[in-house]
């Protein structure tokens, strides 16, 4: 069985890790669809697709990672996503809108429920990074900490926050 996990992964954090593990446990084979893959850098989307792929590869070396550019067209989104990822048996996630679109396309969906949302929410992790608060280090996988340090993610987020 093949599972699908859809997200922006800005950055990959503990909630994403739990979701991907659930998909791996349920399906064995998982493809991760990285949304907003061609968006220009912003405070909401500070990391490139290549950087997000590197985060996912560091934490989960055996999963397939596919970039999914935004369409801003709900009627075509699920077919667009599935054309890029290939067929899947189940889609895992916590975004009701994405799951509804995939379900309408005939994909069985699994909503895992948010785990430690207040600590692991992506916007909160980005805020910690921008503020130079080292607490972000406990919210991302250890393999991702090194990448974010290498890319000076706190400095990048500070610059993006100042520009917005």
Image (cartoon, helix red, strand yellow):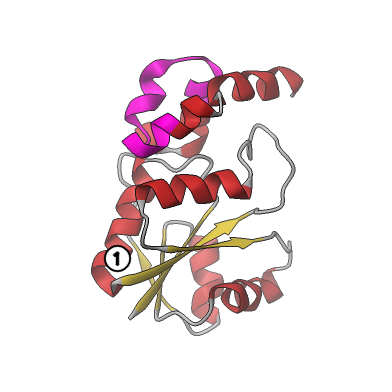
The residue located at (63%, 24%) in the rendering is 156
Up the image or down, 161 lies above or below 90; here it is: above
| Residue 60 is inside the magenta segment | no
Residue extending furthest toward the left: 25
Rendered-image quadrant of the N terminus: bottom left
Residue 66 falls in image quadrant: bottom right
Q: Is residue 138 left or right of residue 93?
A: left
**How many marks can you see?**
1
Give me the residue at 74% from left, 42% from top. Answer: 40
Corner quadrant of residue 20: bottom left
Taking the image as drawn, is residue 158 in sight? yes
Q: Which residues are magenta?
A: 127-146
Q: Is residue 28 left or right of residue 32?
A: left
Residue 79 in picture, x, y percent from top left = 63, 79
Q: Main secondary structure of the magenta part?
A: helix
Toward which corner of the image does residue 113 lie, by quadrant? bottom left
Q: At 53% from the left edge and 15% from the top edge, which residue is drawn?
A: 131
Residue 8 percent coordinates (x, y): 55, 50
Q: Does residue 144 show up magenta in the picture? A: yes
Query: Do we see residue 141 in this rendering?
Result: no
**In the foreground, 84 or 149:** 149
Residue that extends furthest to the bottom in the rendered view of this protein: 106
Q: Residue 59, how many percent across, how many down?
A: 36, 47
The residue shown at (69%, 75%) is 75
Pointer 1: what residue?
Answer: 24
Element marked by disc 1: helix
Residue farthest to the top? 132
On-image quarter of the C terminus: top right
Mark 1 Cα-neighbour bin, 10 Å: few <14, some 14–19, many ≥20: some
């Amino acid at each position: 069985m093949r599972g699908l996990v859809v997200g922006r992964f800005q950055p990959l954090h503990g909630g994403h890790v739990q979701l991907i593990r659930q998909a791996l446990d349920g399906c064995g084979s998982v493809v991760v669809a990285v949304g907003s893959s061609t968006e220009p850098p912003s405070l909401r989307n500070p990391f490139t697709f290549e950087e997000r792929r590197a985060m996912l590869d560091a934490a989960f070396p055996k999963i397939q990672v596919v970039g999914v550019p935004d369409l801003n067209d709900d009627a075509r989104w699920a077919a667009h996503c599935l054309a890029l990822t290939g067929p899947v048996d189940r889609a895992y996630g916590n975004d009701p809108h994405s799951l509804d679109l995939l379900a309408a396309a005939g994909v069985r969906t699994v909503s895992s429920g948010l785990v430690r949302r207040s600590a692991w929410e992506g916007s909160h992790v980005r805020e910690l990074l921008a503020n130079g608060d080292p607490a972000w280090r406990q919210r991302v996988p250890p393999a991702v900490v090194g990448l974010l340090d290498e890319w000076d993610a706190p400095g990048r987020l500070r610059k993006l926050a100042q520009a917005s």
